[in-house]
Image: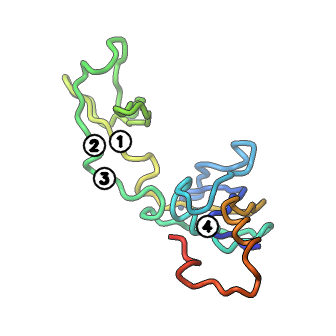
Amino acid sequence: MAVENGNKIKVEYTGTFDDGTVFDSSEKHGQPLEFEVGAGMVIKGFDDAVIGMEVGDEKEVKIEAKDAYGEPNDQMKQKVPKDQLPKDQKPEVGMVLGVSTPDGKQFPAKIIEVNDDTITIDLNHPLAGKNLNFKLKLVSIEESSAKKPAQEEQPAETPVEESEKKTE
């Protein structure tokens, strides 16, 4: 069975930059990455790369920045008054702060400039603008539970319209 959108899969991976530096791996996390293909749980290029793979298949892929975390966006750089920081915190260039959104989600913001009254933070993803290379090995495929009953009820000789096959 080949991977298609809606499958839950497990994949072992090693992610590297173009210079060969490893930035992440399933080995580092102690287990394969598990996700539903096409559900937006991983970057688009990673989702696309596993389509068609079968258990045991290995593959190397290069994911361009646009299909990974995108290009850096200058609008994601913001000046913040220093008095919004905790009084005991001395901001330094390179320091990463946890920033909360109004709905309570947290994400990292890197300090890129420190002035007398303000700091400038970069809210871009740390991997924005970088091409990512992955060595992948498909460990398992599980059909989505939503697909199983429909496929079991449908007679094998019933053709499926092309428009029904596409899930985008």
Residue ID at (27%, 21%): 84
Toward the viewer: 91 or 154?
Answer: 154
Using the numbered discs, state the Cα–Cα distance from disc 1 to disc 3 in whole angstroms. Answer: 9 Å
Rounded to the nearest angstrom, the CA distance separating label 1 from label 4 is 31 Å
Q: Earlier in the sequence, mark 4 or mark 2?
A: 4
SS type, badge 4: loop
Mark 2: few/some/many CA within 10 Å (<14, 14-19, 20+): some
Image depth: mark 1 or mark 4 in front: 4
Q: Amino acid at mark 3?
A: Asn
In-image side of 152 versus 109 (left or right): right
Using the image as rendered, state which of residue 53 and residue 36 is in the foreground.
Answer: 36
Please give the label number shown on residue 77: 2
Q: Earlier in the sequence, mark 1 or mark 4?
A: 4
Instruction: Name the residue that disc number 3 marks.
Output: 73
Classify mark 1: helix, strand or loop: loop
Q: CB atoms at circles 2 and 3 under 8 Å apart?
A: no
Q: Name the residue beneath numbered marker 4.
A: 5
Q: Position of residue 98 (x, y in %)?
A: 42, 30
- Looking at marks 1 and 3 on the same chain, the residue that comes earlier in the sequence is marked by 3
Q: State the CA–CA distance, disc 3 to disc 4.
A: 30 Å
